[in-house]
Amino acid sequence: MKTVLSGIQPSGQLTLGNYIGAMKNFVKLQHDYQCNFMVVDLHAITVPQEPEALREQSESVAALFIAAGIDPNKSNVYLQSHVPPHAELGWLLTTLTSMGELERMTQFKDKAEGKDSVGAGLFVYPSLMAADILVYNADLVPVGDDQKQHLELTRDLASRFNHRYGEYFTIPEAYYPEVGARIMSLDDASKKMSKSNPNPGSHITLLDPPDVIRKKVSRATTDSGSEVRYDPKTKPEISNLMSIYSQCAGVPIKDVQAKFEGVMYGGFKKAVAESIIGVLEPLQKSYEEIRQSGQIHDILAQGAERALEVATRTVDDVKERMGFLPRKC
Ligand code: AMP
Ligand code: TRP
């Protein structure tokens, strides 16, 4: 069976962008692949986190994975920090990564922009992400399209290692949703929807109550026209809402336009909000049950244990190939 790996950072409330861009595909792929879905807490600390908030968010993101429909008996759901080989392989791969490669990463440039002091962890973050993927020799990585460059670097590092030390790593492929690989901000369609945007109106979180969702969608920026037409270049705001509708209502994007022909923006936005609520209401109900049951700790322990077995083996192989003396036990 082929392997899938992906991760989401516990650095704030997850958004509808995380759901459409990544989590929805996690749920879809779990039936046909050996899947590993991680809460990437080691990545989250590349920007400052409050310890208590990090703990709460980590548990919350794990519970959201399960609430969204990931079956923890089929897939491994765990915290990155519970599987130390990620950090170890991250270091080994950092030594194969050039400064120039890291300097070109647009996520790094965006996050570092305007800051007086930038952590070195933020800079080497992509080598750790490469380790996350390569430590399981993952074939497929479901992500939103903002991760494209990181995936390319991962592929380059895998090839570089194979070239220097002999064929070992699988070269992974990215897996994007056909529609919604980049959900945009509700207040500015030139920026991606992000959990770290300080304006709460810019994004819908997976735990927003229905009335908040209705309000945020009704206030979403639109152009001054009135035609519900898919054209991301000239009508980015309406096209973004159409992508959201397409993914939440399960209607192909080409049919969304026909469905809303002659409908004004107000009516269309109401339908968009209801389609989101249709997805998030059951997810929120199951989230509450999971949190209250306390079962998440056992799920995470079981996921980490299974992941650790594979990851440890990979790091041992890699170290042997790189010339480390084995430890006698
Ligand atoms: P992050 O929240 O940065 O850890 O992202 C977790 C996953 O969600 C990654 O696969 C991202 O590509 C995806 N993602 C985040 N924001 C968006 C968005 N606005 N649209 C589509 N995918 C997204
Ligand atoms: N860098 C990803 C993001 O910001 C999160 C991530 C870390 C990830 N490790 C990963 C995604 C491995 C896919 C595979 O969204």
Image (tube, rainbow, N blue to C red):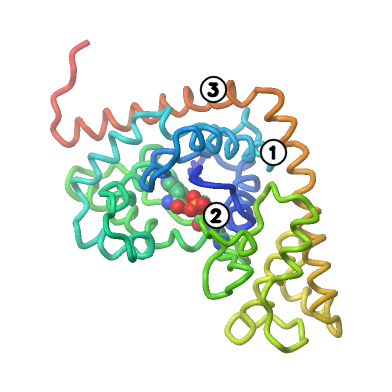
Q: Residues within 10 Å of mark 1 (few under 14, many from 20)?
A: many
Q: Position of residue 117 (x, y in %)?
A: 27, 55
Q: Residue lying furthest top in this view?
A: 329
N-term mark: 2 or 1:
1
Q: Which residue is at a point 60% across and 80% down the rendered structure image?
A: 232
254 vs 236, nearest the viewer = 236
Q: Which residue is mark 3?
A: 302
- What kind of residue is marked 2? Lys
Whole-Å distance between the Cαs marked 2 and 1? 19 Å
Query: Is 268 placed left or right of 2 in the picture?
Result: right
- Placement of the C terminus among the 4 image quadrants: top left
Residues at circles 2 and 1 in contact by the CB criterion of under 8 Å: no
Judge depth for marks 1 and 3 and give the one in front. 1
Instruction: Look at the numbered disc 3 and give the secondary structure of its residue.
Output: helix
Whole-Å distance between the Cαs marked 2 and 3? 28 Å
N-term mark: 1 or 3:
1
- What kind of residue is marked 3? Gln
Residues at circles 2 and 3 in contact by the CB criterion of under 8 Å: no
Query: Is 200 placed left or right of 277 in the picture?
Result: left
Q: Is residue 141 visible?
A: no
Q: Which residue is mark 2?
A: 195
Instruction: Look at the numbered disc 2 and give the secondary structure of its residue.
Output: loop
Q: Which residue is at a point 65% across and 72% down the rendered structure image?
A: 240
Q: Position of residue 288 (x, y in %)?
A: 73, 34
- What kind of residue is marked 1? Ala
Q: How many marks?
A: 3
- Please give the label number shown on residue 67: 1
